[in-house]
Image (cartoon, rainbow, N blue to C red):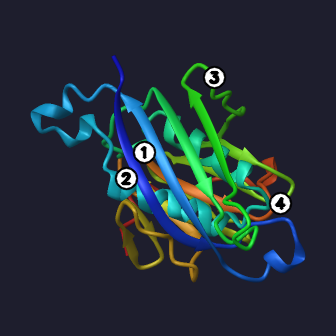
């Protein structure tokens, strides 16, 4: 039996579209998301056996607003792979078995019709992209187009990773730092200092969006001395 969490009519504005007139202005979109999973344990009052829909709304908004996607299909696939990915370090949520993402672009046809894209996948049909790990930094692509990359990045203990130019990152879990800032889950990495450090003894995780996509030369980590004090 599959239970469902539904997130309806998440309204936000972002840059999305192929045409030149769409690349320099925000457009409204509406997200509707359905998550299929077993909520039996969550019924006993355990949030870690469910999915916090407030956190999910923030994460999906981050993907939409930083992705600057050319097509709704790309945005929806990035969101589906993110939702169906196994929970990363510090993410206290249940595994989602199936998901459906619906994206509506209400102003695209100036009221003549209401265009939307609907993508649905299960754990068996999501078709994950190949991942790579170098020096305790694991990079799992969620989507790569010619213009945009969306990634789940795992940062091992006592490691640091420098965000490449054109990248934005959101903390998913773990005790991470950027410059003088201690970063909390669901907090974006400040743009002033692109290096994210994990000075703890457990893994941390980031949601990263880049323009253009990453390549192997950008996925290097920097070692941190275990005895180096936190600033």
Question: At which x and y percent is residue 103?
Answer: 60, 54
User: Mark 4 — residue?
Assistant: 147
Q: Tell me how far mark 3 sits from mark 1, CA to CA.
A: 28 Å
Q: Nearer the viewer, residue 164 or 136?
A: 164
User: Mark 3 — residue?
Assistant: 125
The earlier-in-sequence mark between 1 and 2 is 2
The earlier-in-sequence mark between 2 and 3 is 3
Question: At which x and y percent is residue 220?
Answer: 69, 52
Q: Residue furthest left?
A: 44
Residue 199 appears in the picture as rendered: yes
Judge whether 158 appears above or below 25 on screen: above
Q: Residue furthest front?
A: 112
User: Mark 2 — residue?
Assistant: 174
Q: Find numbered disc 3 in the image and state the secondary structure of the residue it sits on.
A: loop
User: Mark 1 — residue?
Assistant: 203
The earlier-in-sequence mark between 3 and 1 is 3
Q: Tell me how far mark 4 sits from mark 3, CA to CA.
A: 25 Å
Residue 85 appears in the picture as rendered: no
Q: Judge left or right: residue 45 versus residue 98.
A: left
Judge whether 13 appears above or below 115 on screen: below
Q: Answer whether labels 2 and 3 touch (C-beta < 8 Å).
A: no
Looking at the image, is mark 2 or mark 3 nearer the viewer? 3
The earlier-in-sequence mark between 1 and 4 is 4
């Amino acid at each position: 039996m599959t239970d469902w969490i539904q997130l309806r009519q998440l309204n936000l504005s972002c840059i999305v579209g192929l045409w030149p007139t769409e690349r320099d202005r925000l457009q409204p979109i509406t997200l509707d998301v359905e998550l299929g999973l077993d909520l039996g344990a969550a019924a006993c009052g355990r949030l870690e056996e469910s999915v916090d829909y407030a956190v999910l709304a923030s994460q999906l908004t981050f993907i939409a607003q930083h992705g600057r996607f050319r097509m709704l299909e790309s945005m929806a696939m990035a969101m589906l792979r993110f939702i169906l990915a196994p929970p990363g370090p510090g993410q206290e949520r249940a595994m989602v078995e199936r998901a459906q993402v619906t994206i509506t672009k209400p102003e695209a046809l100036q009221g003549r019709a209401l265009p939307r894209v609907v993508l649905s996948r299960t754990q068996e049909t999501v078709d994950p992209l190949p991942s790579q790990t170098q020096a305790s930094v694991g990079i799992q692509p969620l989507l790569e187009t010619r213009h945009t990359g969306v990634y789940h990045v795992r940062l091992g203990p006592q490691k640091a990773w420098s965000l490449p130019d054109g990248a934005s990152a959101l903390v998913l879990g773990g005790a991470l730092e950027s410059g003088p800032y201690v970063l909390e889950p669901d907090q974006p990495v400040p743009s002033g200092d692109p290096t994210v450090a994990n000075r703890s003894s457990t893994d941390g995780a980031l949601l990263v969006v880049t323009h253009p996509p990453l390549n192997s030369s950008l996925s290097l980590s920097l070692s941190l001395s275990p005895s180096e004090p936190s600033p």
